[in-house]
Image (cartoon, rainbow, N blue to C red):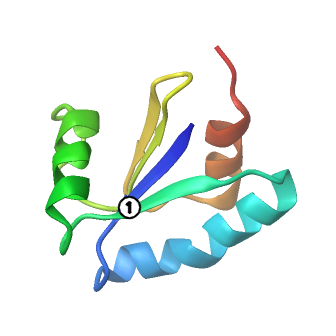
Amino acid sequence: MLMEFYGKECGHCKKMDSLMDKLEQELGIKVQRMEIWHDETNEKKFVDEARGICQGVPFFVNTETQKTICGEASYGELKAWAVEKK
């Protein structure tokens, strides 16, 4: 599963929106997007997944490979993260 943790008002997260849309469309996949600034359940999930690796958003997790991206990334980085297998 691919997950993105973001904040509703986060400028960095907003920059990633179009790249995430493109990733989902191009690869035919769904990224579980979870807003953490206004949702306590999602915030707790973020803390569990971030494990001290990342202190803020955006934060991306590939649960199959346990690979993460902390912060903004290029489309190439996102695509490599999304398609990597164990």
In this orientation, which residue lies closer to the viewer: 19 or 41? 41
- Residue drawn at x 62%, y 50% as measured from the top left: 78
Q: Residues within 10 Å of mark 1 (few under 14, many from 20)?
A: some
Q: Quadrant of the N terminus?
A: top right
Q: Secondary structure at mark 1?
A: strand
**Relative image position of residue 27 (x, y in whole percent):** 83, 51
Q: Is residue 15 left or right of residue 50?
A: right
Above or below, 3 against 80 in this view is below
**Relative image position of residue 11 (x, y in whole percent):** 35, 83
Above or below, 1 against 56 in this view is above
- Residue drawn at x 25%, y 44% as measured from the top left: 45
- Residue drawn at x 50%, y 79% as measured from the top left: 15
Residue on which disc 1 sits: 34
Q: Is residue 68 left or right of residue 74?
A: left
Q: Amino acid at mark 1?
A: Met
The single residue placed furthest to the top in the displayed view is 86
Above or below, 27 against 36 in this view is above
Above or below, 55 against 63 in this view is below
Q: Quadrant of the C terminus?
A: top right
Q: Where, by quadrant of the figure, is residue 81 drawn?
A: top right
